[in-house]
Image (tube, helix red, strand yellow):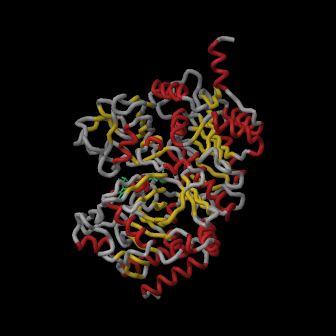
């Protein structure tokens, strides 16, 4: 045997876990890759794969001085965001996918996709990525194995999840008792012998499919973000939400932050905002109010279980940040900037500067010339944007200077407050406190937001996005609401997190944001904490408790009293206009809508004086 062949054999790897090996063999027989590699997670492997991506033109190595060990990628212009209309929950019973998900019979879907998968990895390498969401030392480690034919995915998965040989060894130790989510991914672009590859292989036909009963994921056609990094939305939200329903916990689209008061009191807060509505920014907040400090635990996903003390504990299952690039800068998110400047990151669909650094709209030091994400010359006078609105940085969480030590605790942190928030130009005030858990669940269930570029489709359209989970609930959303209510009912009410509804995005008549946001959002965190402590005043309104102008700390804030009042305003007329939309939304659920939510709606109508 030649040295080269030995080397290849080592890479080929394999596992002593019979079930896993059988699945890998079955997928290989179906997709017919040229090679199979078991991903180890070693540095040498990272170097080899990133070099391969550079050679293929998918990656450009960035300036070592500015972004060490970092890469720029531009995707195919048709493959830039999650594809919600191509995302399916293939439960056995259609009813279980509910009115908010696409559904197809699981057997029909498998037949269809087997047709697509047949030979789809021809000419490519099939990578097997053992990973764990959360801690490998957790009581029930949440394993997954992603099979993919994309090196970009392998490299990104290494940043976003704990991957590699240590995880595989743990799966093998647990043997057939090890539960793992099989997650199959292909870009759907086989290569004929001698055929030149493109920089960003993908297929115009895309399917992002969850099989909830089997805890299994099949993804085809896309190489980007939540479509392809299957540990993230597909597993940690869609599949995990089904596990959570069955086992009595919550898998949520939430950041987790640690707030430290000037008196050194510590509070943990979780917050759910729809995609591209401010989770990463709030998670890494640099408070503008003196003496307050924020540390980060997570920016996108929270798994929450009740602890023995009756409190709700949250862990972040991820290992990196997949953050929206545009708008990120030294002012809005200095902590993200520090994190990415340490390197070891992948930047997708941003602009490439002439000194091989990256740039995007909103970043400081606008270059006189750059190459846009579409590969075109770009100058500040260009009509087109340099970066796609859903361009992203993918960066290791451990590089974040303000990462809280508790991130490493598999038990998680006890949550004191949950924020729901959306992007609304009108109607929704800066912050509203719910009366109790059920009212808070109602706020979450009726959460609305303007659509963003994080998913394909129209941007800026107001839609209901319950708990910021509309694209991520892996089952019937009516049952999901009931699950939230049940968890509250079974808990000690005094230990439940308090629920708040926030909106950083209200506009004035000229269309400008009323609230400065970002670091100033610390003022809202402070008010919420003072409400928990019984220290801050509030006005009772038909929709809940909002701050009195005096109770919100506005010292040093450059904002007129009129603007503060406008940001906090509850306008009954605007809310009356909201009612038919909520009714239409609730009507979708038929008899799966929990009666408690109907009671909440009736109460709101009565308080607003709506018939
Ligand atoms: N006006 C305003 N914009 C904000 C604020 N916070 C975030 N944004 C902007 O909202 C966009 C998305 O913010 P992110 O924090 O990345 O959103 P996210 O919720 O983490 O998004 P996903 O990663 O898609 O789940 C960025 O362009 C931010 O600049 C805020 O307080 N005020
Ligand atoms: O999943 C993705 O592609 C990015 C993300 O966090 C979201 O859209 O919420
Ligand atoms: Mn997200």
- The reply, left or right, for residue 560 in relation to residue 407 is left
**Residue 310's x, y, as percent?**
61, 67
**Observer able to see residue 150:** yes
Which of the 4 image quadrants contains residue 105? bottom right
The vertical placement of 195 against 299, above or below, is above
- The reply, left or right, for residue 178 in relation to residue 417 is right
- The reply, left or right, for residue 224 in relation to residue 370 is right
**Residue 336's x, y, as percent?**
38, 46
Quarter that holds the N terminus: top right
Residue shown at 52%/40% (left/top)? 223
The vertical placement of 476 against 111, above or below, is below
- The reply, left or right, for residue 387 in relation to residue 147 is left
Number of numbered tags placed on the structure image: 0
**Residue 501's x, y, as percent?**
44, 69
The vertical placement of 198 against 258, above or below, is above
The vertical placement of 581 against 205, above or below, is below
Front-most of residues 310 and 439: 310
Residue shown at 58%/45% (left/top)? 230
**Residue 300's x, y, as percent?**
49, 53
Front-most of residues 502 and 123: 502
Name the residue furthest front: 263
Residue shown at 30%/64% (left/top)? 515
Which of the 4 image quadrants contains residue 5? top right
Which of the 4 image quadrants contains residue 550? bottom left
**Observer able to see residue 276:** no
Front-most of residues 113 and 532: 532
């Amino acid at each position: 045997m030649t040295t080269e062949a030995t080397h290849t054999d080592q890479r080929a790897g394999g596992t002593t876990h019979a079930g896993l090996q059988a699945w890998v063999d079955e997928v290989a027989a179906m997709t017919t890759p040229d090679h199979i590699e078991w991903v180890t997670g070693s540095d040498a492997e990272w170097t080899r794969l990133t070099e391969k991506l550079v050679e293929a033109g998918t990656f450009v190595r960035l300036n070592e001085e500015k972004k060490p060990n970092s890469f720029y990628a531009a995707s195919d212009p048709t493959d830039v965001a999650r594809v919600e209309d191509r995302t399916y929950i293939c439960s056995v019973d259609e009813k279980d996918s509910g009115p908010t998900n696409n559904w197809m019979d699981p057997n029909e879907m498998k037949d269809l996709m087997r047709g697509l998968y047949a030979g789809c990895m021809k000419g490519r390498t099939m990578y097997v990525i053992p990973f764990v969401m959360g801690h490998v030392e957790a009581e029930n480690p949440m394993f997954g194995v992603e099979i993919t034919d994309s090196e970009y995915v392998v490299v990104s998965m290494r940043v976003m999840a704990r991957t590699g040989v240590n995880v595989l060894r743990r799966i093998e130790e647990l043997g057939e008792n090890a539960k793992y989510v099989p997650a199959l991914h292909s870009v759907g672009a086989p290569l004929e012998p001698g055929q030149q590859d493109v920089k960003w292989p993908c297929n115009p036909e895309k399917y992002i499919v969850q099989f909830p009963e089997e805890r299994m994921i099949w993804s085809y056609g896309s190489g980007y973000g939540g479509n392809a990094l299957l540990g993230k939305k597909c597993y940690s939200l869609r599949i995990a939400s089904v596990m959570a329903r069955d086992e009595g916990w919550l898998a949520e689209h939430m950041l987790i932050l640690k707030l430290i008061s000037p008196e050194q009191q510590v509070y943990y807060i979780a917050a759910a905002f729809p995609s591209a509505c401010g989770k990463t920014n709030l998670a890494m907040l640099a408070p503008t109010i003196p003496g307050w400090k924020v540390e980060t635990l997570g920016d996108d996903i929270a798994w929450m279980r009740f602890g023995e003390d009756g409190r709700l504990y949250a862990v972040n299952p991820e290992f990196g940040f997949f953050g929206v690039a545009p708008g990120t800068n030294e002012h809005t998110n200095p902590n993200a900037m520090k994190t990415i400047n340490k390197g070891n990151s992948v930047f997708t669909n941003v602009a490439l500067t002439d000194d091989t650094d990256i740039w995007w709209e909103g970043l400081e030091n606008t270059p006189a010339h750059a190459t846009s994400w579409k590969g075109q010359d770009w100058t500040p006078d260009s009509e087109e944007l340099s970066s796609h609105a859903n361009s992203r940085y993918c960066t290791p969480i451990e590089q974040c200077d303000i990462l809280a030590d508790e991130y490493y605790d598999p038990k998680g942190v006890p949550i004191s407050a949950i924020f729901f928030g959306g992007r609304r130009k009108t109607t929704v005030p800066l912050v509203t406190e719910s009366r109790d858990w059920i009212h808070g669940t109602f706020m979450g269930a009726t959460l609305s937001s303007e659509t963003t570029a994080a998913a394909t489709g129209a941007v800026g359209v107001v839609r209901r996005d319950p708990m910021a989970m509309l694209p991520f609930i892996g089952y019937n959303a009516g049952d999901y609401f009931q699950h939230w209510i049940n968890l509250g009912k079974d808990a000690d009410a005094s230990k439940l997190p308090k629920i708040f509804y926030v909106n950083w995005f209200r506009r004035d008549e000229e269309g400008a944001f009323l609230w400065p946001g970002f670091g100033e959002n610390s003022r809202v965190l402070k008010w919420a904490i003072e409400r928990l402590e019984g220290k801050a005043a509030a006005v009772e309104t038909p929709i809940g408790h909002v701050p009195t102008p005096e109770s919100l700390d506005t010292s040093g804030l450059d904002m007129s009293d009129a603007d503060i009042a406008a940001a906090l305003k509850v306008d009954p007329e605007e809310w009356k206009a909201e009612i038919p939309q909520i009714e239409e939304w609730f009507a979708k659920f038929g008899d799966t809508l929990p009666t408690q939510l109907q009671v909440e709606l009736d109460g709101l109508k009565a308080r607003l004086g709506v018939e």
